[in-house]
Image (cartoon, grey):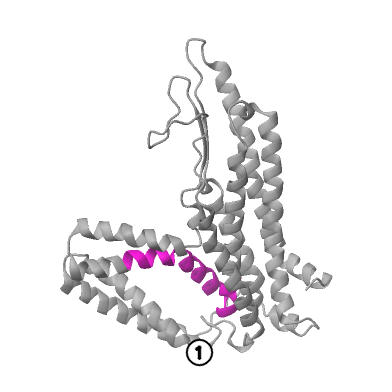
Amino acid sequence: MFQKALWLHSYKQGKYFIWLFWITSFYTLSYKYYVDAAKSFHFSQTITEKVNYHYQYFLSPEDHLFIQGIVIIALACVLIGWERHNKIMDSLWSLPFKRRYIYLTKWLLGVLNIIAVYAINWGLFAILKKTTFHNKYQLFSPFHSYFLYTAIVLIAIYTLTLFMGTITANILSQSIFTGIMLILPFGLALLWAGFISVHLYGTHEKTYKIENQYVSVSSHINILSPIEDLEVRFDYDPESAYTDQNGKRINEPNFSKIPSAWNLLSPIMYILILLPLGTYLYTQSPNEQNGKLLLFSKLHKPFIACTVFCFALFGGRIIGGTQSIIGYYIGFGVIGLICYIVLSRLLKKKIYWRLK
């Protein structure tokens, strides 16, 4: 697993996305943190003495995690999906390395880069906080949890993407299925709520209520659950009392929201389950299936059943809504049938691009 040749091979495959991940991370985190300090200082110097200075700083995962997630998903797709497309995997597996070591090397390459990027940015934040205008108004304690939560979520996303590469047979299906899996808990909650509502309630008010209930439950199994309410926010206004949204008195201008550490259980479980499962499936990969939608023919029937059911629920919700049960089942049947026909054909075809 620690063979230099394996590390060099994986690095050469993904080096452009690795460096892109570093560049985008430093730009969206440390650089913007410094720029915000400079802007706040400049603004404080331009106001008149009769006006009290109002300091604000806000950081949320939406500011950086979306672009980081795209890059890290692309890295995982290149390391496995693109390897299948270029048929490099055949020559790689002919080398005297165990397949599980090859897979674990790919996983460690991404994980170590994520940890290194976040550790360095955390250190830079600490230095910048002490040496810039932020130091006057901020506490550093919320950043500890913030960097930990976002790093674990990114590692889980990377692990999920690599795992999808062990059951899909081309880079396109690997990337698409990864995106679907990230929103699947939320999407299924909405679709199932619509199914229940059209049969039992049939009103928008009841539908909205049970949608919120189902989405709340699904958030506990969502890989993104630790960052749903995560934010670092400092808001100092000398003319206003320090109270949060619930009216609770706060002793300093720290309005940060850090979810419970229990929320980390979801992405950690993804990592603990998908890493060994992906390692095993990678050792069993049938290379003759490369280019198809899925690698293992045994997955075809359950995949068709689950996908057709989900698209049928979606069709029923779009066409019939939540008030017409007849329209719901028309959409359910039509969209489900179309999905079945399309998938049955796609699973038999191989997809190859001419790009090299």
Q: Position of residue 345 (x, y in %)?
A: 42, 85
In the rendered image, is residue 169 in sight? no
Does the stretch in magenta take in 163? yes
Query: Please, what is the dominant secondary structure of the magenta stretch?
Result: helix
- Depth check: give the residue in front, 248 or 131: 248
Task: Say if 228 sits above or below 199 in the image.
Answer: above
- At 53% from the left edge and 83% from the top edge, which residue is drawn? 350
Helix, strand, or loop for circle 1?
helix
Q: Position of residue 188 (x, y in %)?
A: 37, 68
Q: Position of residue 300 (x, y in %)?
A: 46, 86
Does the stretch in magenta take in 285? no
- At 41% from the left edge and 83% from the top edge, which residue is drawn? 304
Mark 1 neighbour density, 10 Å: few (under 14) some (14–19) many (20 or more): few
> Where does the C terminus fall, quadrant-wise?
bottom right
Task: Say if 79 sits above or below 300 in the image.
Answer: above
Range of magenta residues:
162-191
In the rendered image, is residue 156 in sight? yes
Identify the amino acid type marked 1.
Lys
Q: Position of residue 146 (x, y in %)?
A: 58, 47
- At 75% from the left edge and 66% from the top edge, which residue is drawn? 12
| Residue on which the image places disc 1 | 298
> Where does the N terminus fall, quadrant-wise?
bottom right
